[in-house]
Image (tube, rainbow, N blue to C red):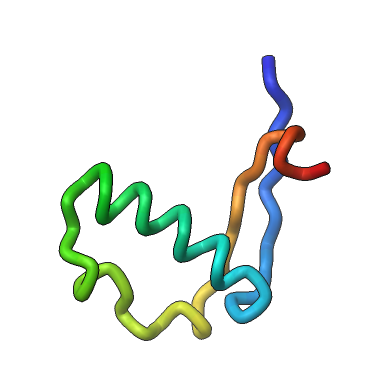
Amino acid sequence: MERFFINQIDWQEGRASFLAVRHEVFVVEQGVPEELEEDGLDAECTQLLAVDECDDK
């Protein structure tokens, strides 16, 4: 079983990582139009990013 870690990251610090994951999941996989994917509330919300131990090194 792979280990993974869930990290709370400030929006500005993790913005590029969050947007890359969300683009892949919502726009590419689920077909959400890019213009609807961001709502402008991200800086006000708690942001969590899960990574496996390979990504964490």
Q: Residue at x 20, y 72 (%)?
A: 36
The spot of residue 23 in percent (x, y) is 36, 57
The spot of residue 11 in percent (x, y) is 58, 76
- Residue 29 occupies quadrant: top left
Q: Residue furthest top?
A: 1
Q: Residue furthest right?
A: 57
The spot of residue 26 in percent (x, y) is 29, 53
Classify 36 as above or below 54.
below
Q: Is 37 situated left or right of 8 in this image? A: left
Q: Is the N terminus in the top left, top right, bottom left or bottom right quadrant?
A: top right
Q: Compare residues 11 and 16 and report the one nearer the observer.
A: 16
Classify 22 as above or below 40.
above
Q: Compare residues 51 and 45 and report the one nearer the observer.
A: 51
Classify 46 as above or below 40.
above
Q: Is 2 situated left or right of 39 in this image? A: right
Q: Is 20 situated left or right of 11 in this image? A: left
Q: Residue at x 71, y 41 (%)?
A: 55
Q: Is the C terminus in the top left, top right, bottom left or bottom right quadrant?
A: top right
Classify 40 as above or below 24.
below
The spot of residue 3 in percent (x, y) is 73, 27
Q: Residue at x 56, y 72 (%)?
A: 15
Q: Residue at x 74, y 34 (%)?
A: 54
Question: So how many labels did they put on this image?
Answer: 0
